[in-house]
Amino acid sequence: MTQRVELATVMDRLAVDEVVTDYAGAVDDGDWTAYLGLFTPDGRADYRSAGGIEGAAGQVAAWLAESMLLFPMRQHLIVNRRVRFGRLEQDIGDTARVRADYVNPMRFAADGEGAAAPDFVCGGRYAFGLLRTYDGWRLREVVVEEKWRRLPEPRVAPAAE
């Protein structure tokens, strides 16, 4: 590989990584316009393993906007990113696949009495499919594979004396 090709590959890796990071930030911040801007026009997302839906990015964004109201605090930690570039027609490097693990702590909305709500934490693996477009790298596919979740401990009323 020439230095020029190696540099282009590094730049693509950084750009793909930025899309994945922007995805996490958009979901955490509830910025559904930014979320949609990360997808190609035919982009899709699949959250079924986490109890969600699968569909076009716009449909999924609407579902997320409603579902995430339960969790005013959320923070995706996306780690162990594995990037692989693929071939589209005859051009190498116009597609990318990213496999990445995640941990996602979220806090439920506070109860009506103002008490702090408990946390909900889940983890698993993302599979991202990306396409190089004239506007840069965009998501064609996001698949969530939730592997575990920790629900809040049930609240127990104090024993009566």
Image (cartoon, rainbow, N blue to C red):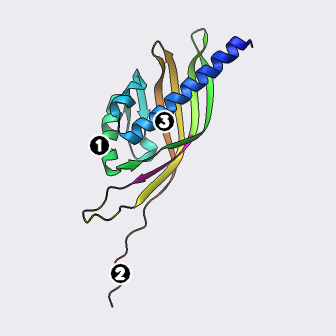
The answer to whether residue 22 is left or right of residue 116 is right
Q: Position of residue 15 (x, y in %)?
A: 55, 24
Q: Position of residue 22 (x, y in %)?
A: 46, 32
Query: Farthest top residue?
Result: 90
Query: Vertical placement of 47 versus 132: above or below?
Result: below
* Residue that mark 2 sits on: 158
Q: Amino acid at mark 1?
A: Glu
Q: Residues within 10 Å of mark 1 (few under 14, many from 20)?
A: few
Query: Farthest bottom residue?
Result: 161
Is disc 1 placed on a helix, strand or loop?
helix
Q: Amino acid at mark 3?
A: Val
Q: State the separation of the CA atoms marked 2 and 1.
A: 34 Å
Q: Position of residue 95 (x, y in %)?
A: 56, 19
* Residue that mark 1 sits on: 66
Label 2–label 1 contact, CB within 8 A: no
Residue drawn where x is 49% and y is 28% of the image = 19
Instruction: Please tell me which of labels 1 and 3 falls first in the chain.
Output: 1
Q: Position of residue 37 (x, y in %)?
A: 38, 25
Query: Vertical placement of 25 versus 42: above or below?
Result: below
Instruction: Please tell me which of labels 2 and 1 falls first in the chain.
Output: 1
Residue drawn where x is 32% and y is 55% of the image = 109
Quarter of the rendering occupied by the C terminus: bottom left
Residue drawn where x is 51% and y is 24% of the image = 130
* Residue that mark 3 sits on: 143
- Range shown magenta: 101-109
Q: Nearer the viewer, mark 3 or mark 2?
A: 2
Quarter of the rendering occupied by the N terminus: top right
Is disc 2 placed on a helix, strand or loop?
loop
Q: Amino acid at mark 2?
A: Pro
Label 3–label 2 contact, CB within 8 A: no
Is disc 3 placed on a helix, strand or loop?
strand
